[in-house]
Amino acid sequence: MVGRTHGIHGEPIVFGVKFLSWYAEMERHSERLSHARRTMSVGKMSGAMGTAVHISPALETAILSELSLKPESMATQVVARDRHAELFSTLALIGSGLERIAVEIRHLQRTEVREAEEPFRPGQKGSSAMPHKRNPIGSENITGLARLLRSYSQAAFENVALWHERDISHSSVERVIGPDAFGLLDYMIARLGGILKDLIIYPEKMKQNLDMTRGLVYSQSVLLALTRAGLPRETAYKIVQDAAMQTWSGPNDLMTNLKLHPELPASFPERELLAAFDPAPFLSGLDEIYDRVLGEHHHHFGNEGC
Amino acid sequence: MVGRTHGIHGEPIVFGVKFLSWYAEMERHSERLSHARRTMSVGKMSGAMGTAVHISPALETAILSELSLKPESMATQVVARDRHAELFSTLALIGSGLERIAVEIRHLQRTEVREAEEPFRPGQKGSSAMPHKRNPIGSENITGLARLLRSYSQAAFENVALWHERDISHSSVERVIGPDAFGLLDYMIARLGGILKDLIIYPEKMKQNLDMTRGLVYSQSVLLALTRAGLPRETAYKIVQDAAMQTWSGPNDLMTNLKLHPELPASFPERELLAAFDPAPFLSGLDEIYDRVLGEHHHHFGNEGC
Amino acid sequence: MVGRTHGIHGEPIVFGVKFLSWYAEMERHSERLSHARRTMSVGKMSGAMGTAVHISPALETAILSELSLKPESMATQVVARDRHAELFSTLALIGSGLERIAVEIRHLQRTEVREAEEPFRPGQKGSSAMPHKRNPIGSENITGLARLLRSYSQAAFENVALWHERDISHSSVERVIGPDAFGLLDYMIARLGGILKDLIIYPEKMKQNLDMTRGLVYSQSVLLALTRAGLPRETAYKIVQDAAMQTWSGPNDLMTNLKLHPELPASFPERELLAAFDPAPFLSGLDEIYDRVLGEHHHHFGNEGC
Amino acid sequence: MVGRTHGIHGEPIVFGVKFLSWYAEMERHSERLSHARRTMSVGKMSGAMGTAVHISPALETAILSELSLKPESMATQVVARDRHAELFSTLALIGSGLERIAVEIRHLQRTEVREAEEPFRPGQKGSSAMPHKRNPIGSENITGLARLLRSYSQAAFENVALWHERDISHSSVERVIGPDAFGLLDYMIARLGGILKDLIIYPEKMKQNLDMTRGLVYSQSVLLALTRAGLPRETAYKIVQDAAMQTWSGPNDLMTNLKLHPELPASFPERELLAAFDPAPFLSGLDEIYDRVLGEHHHHFGNEGC
């Protein structure tokens, strides 16, 4: 399929690298969540001012260990709120990661693109007015919820600077964002999981889209072939850009426009030009990248999945 | 051109209504900015505690009027910071409005859509690696800057609750976001203005995209025609949805699939069916809408612009 | 009572100016809320793309007027979301204004200050561990909730830039922040209203606090008296600052330290010095300020309330 | 000195535990910053789409290792932006931690409290109008800057969900918040460091404040003594609360009011009552707490420092 930067066709990729990129990001989120969980796994029984007057630190440690908690090393009346802010900013971060996946699905489902589509139940109505509609409403929902998770983290940051040995301004915030943030994130994960599990894929449309710019996605391959053949990079760039711009605006494909370009050296072998339009080299590094993310023992589906 | 909701083709529109919608929004922003300007057009000379000990309120009013400012009716040591928070949230709001336009341009420029494109200077390079690239970098830039304006408003909200007759925590914030927010917004407006002024439009592609779903964009017209002919809405919806889903997945256009549908009443006149696929009715309300936004004396370009 | 800037004693004020300042701010919030209400009082029946195909703009206007709504002049599938963002940023602004009052009460109730106190019900427990506690928990609660209102406005700003003729990402956000923001703000207003209505005031403590710095709060009065007597401002400032710093660190009051200062001109009349320590002039401008905020016909309580 | 919750006197503490609490928090921030640094220590040379077409993953790894960077395991055109969002939310978190210290200093410097004070240079002017002023302007400045760091993190969160293989909306944001966030945080650390290094401490005032409520800070000690003597907790609580409320409002100290309370058992030994007003037990757990935070080999200053 085509890879896109700035929403514009770039170069060939395989669909799987999108999942691989999300997988790698989710591993980071998973690690951050474990970190935040450790950060939060503290308790305190060190009294009204945190100074361990009535219960000794040793006893506190013993009791909390029964709950698999560590003692807050130096508490105020409460556990320090930078811990909670880390947690809520981690949830915001995970939400933004889910949003990245959701936005991708929304893009892939756009009518003009239509390379993938959210599952659509029999009997489901996409629109009460327009019976033809099939909308990525799950992914849109998740996109919105990510905004909420981000906003909650702001309130959690503001909770850090409590007055003296504590004030209770954090409490009204936490009573709302605690259940809401976890509930929403759980919902987002479940809903996005369902969407990804049953995602409808249109490989034929991927192929069509890859070819729709009549060779433009191989412009870098041509550029490199020309420079390997000895052309100065600036000259090569100019030739390819000229031909590409004609391809955007006219009927010819890039190869034709290149051949028609007056500055293309007559000595440049046709075989090299043809080779530049071969999608196969774009798969060459994939196995190694899959290994890098998944470890060497994963099933090699890089090429097969293409 | 086709109108899109959820990124999915909906029904025919004209390109101009996008601008009309932005225009109407910008009028609201303009009014908000005037409001914020009035809110900010106050001064104070009422002394260290705002209690007008050394300069009388009457004298303060007289002096400030020389500067076209009103006195803060009851100041602390400073003018109240809800005024500044209104200003910065207005700037954030305007930034989000500019982002809406920028995101639209980015969408329209997507390779598969390509109905409009940011101006691309001769000699400009879209990508050092991929010579064919023409990216909507101006609109992307504006999209990012809107995030900054939003974020500044948060800091401005936090500045409202100063301690007693003032603390100076607001000052370090305002010294940064004051010049930055205005500078960025001015830049955004100028840059987006330049993009819109020289926006490249592809009417042929708009026409192609409108037709690419082979009639699906007329599904509501068919639905309404069937109900006008006496079919219960549920039955009509089922027929149109069935035919639409076959159109999404198969080679036929919607009209063909409708005709093949076993539940389409034989009595339904072909002429009614044909009429439902006419784009002309979608223009019927536009003149009145243009009047509504622009006033009755504007040049009627609704139909001509289509 | 003493006015405070930076948390440090400044000059004499009366308690009422705090309320006057809040009153003036709340009038601005009230006007903003009316503005936001007008902004939100629109509807749309202009169809799936906002282009008034099936219902004419005139009919839409007529129907909406039955609901006391104006039509969105140019809608997409939905009413434009800058309207909602204005609303939620107004709620955030009001929340920040309530926070300003709440933070003031928390400060006034601090044990060392104790000029005012939230009502404390008979039988209420301030702390299960420390029976002597009387905490400003209502004001702390409101302080926290203001953080939530601020955070919601961020999500509302992000809702503005919907895709094309609408996407539905705004919906999941609004379903949460709509009821939550209004519910919380209503609660905040009711709770703060109850606190203010039954606020306990300690005028004796206000008097003690005013005098606790042994005359420092009159430093500007002395400075101005010296300059009126012909001293260069820099010299006068140095004399007063020297004496003030000795007052902060030593046992004498400011007047004594001034008299002991070698640079105080012998010719400076004792009567002028005594007059500088008179709180009465600090009330001179108040009536006019009350008039300015409340109109000329309010009951003049500036002097009496002192 | 007195510990305070909700701004109200609680129980005796030592000044050092505030620093100990900050120290423990800063250790967490330090660890988070190291985490974020590792998160950011990646590079990519895997080409326009991140698919390692022209440079093999092995070569990329080798080159990046020269720069002490790891390769982004699966990049798009750019390194994934959840990494940057982690970084900026960590900076926001650290800023909020510095704000906690700054707010504490501002509170301690309040005129009524005056237990500590920012350094004040000879010749410095606290206020051009009021020569006696010594304001915590450094801590107020830091309080404001923390708001900016928080706001930047919002923009960074919004940068995560780039379109497809990247869009460039993140860039305009990062060009601003990258230098600004680091510059501000560096400034905040340096400035707060200077303030803490030369912080002026008033131990006599700490002692006065501890005693100003005439024994109220020992209410829990009395409560526990009464329950140890066999009184039901509810009865004991009522006695102490009654006596405490009389102490707040009347001239007697808590001990006197307790002795006057009709429900105080005659059998309760005076010696126990006296012991409850001894500050020494409040130091009992401190050595162990210092050990817990600093390790066992630190110099034991818990008792000495009191």
Image (cartoon, coloured by chain):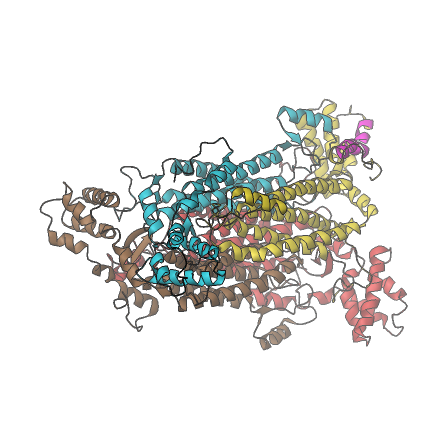
Chain colours: A red, B yellow, C cyan, D brown
Task: Find residue B36 and report its horizontal and vertical position in percent.
Answer: 61, 44
For the C terminus of chain C, the quadrant is top left
Residue B296 at least partly seen: yes
Q: Can you give x and y, in whole percent of width and height, for residue A186 in the image?
A: 49, 48
Q: Position of residue A182 (x, y in %)?
A: 47, 48
In the displayed structure, A54 sits above or below B16; it is below
Q: How many marks?
A: 0
State the extent of the magenta-drawn residues as a range.
Answer: B271-291
* Residue at the far front in the pictured view: C267
Left or right of C169 in this view: C248 = left
Seen in the picture, residue B19 relative to B236 is either above or below; the reply is: below
Check residue B274 for magenta coloring: yes
Task: Determine the residue located farthest toward the top in the rendered image.
Answer: B230
The quarter of the picture where residue A275 lies is bottom right
Magenta highlight: main SS: helix
C79 and C167: which is toward the camera: C79
C110 vs B207, nearest the viewer = C110
Residue B264 among those drawn in magenta? no
Q: What residue do we see at 39% from left, 50% from top?
A: C275
Q: Position of residue B113 (x, y in %)?
A: 75, 49
Along the line of sight, which residue is nearer the eye, C257 or D291? C257
The residue positioned farthest toward the left in the image shown:
D267
Q: State the image quarter where residue A164 is shown.
A: bottom left
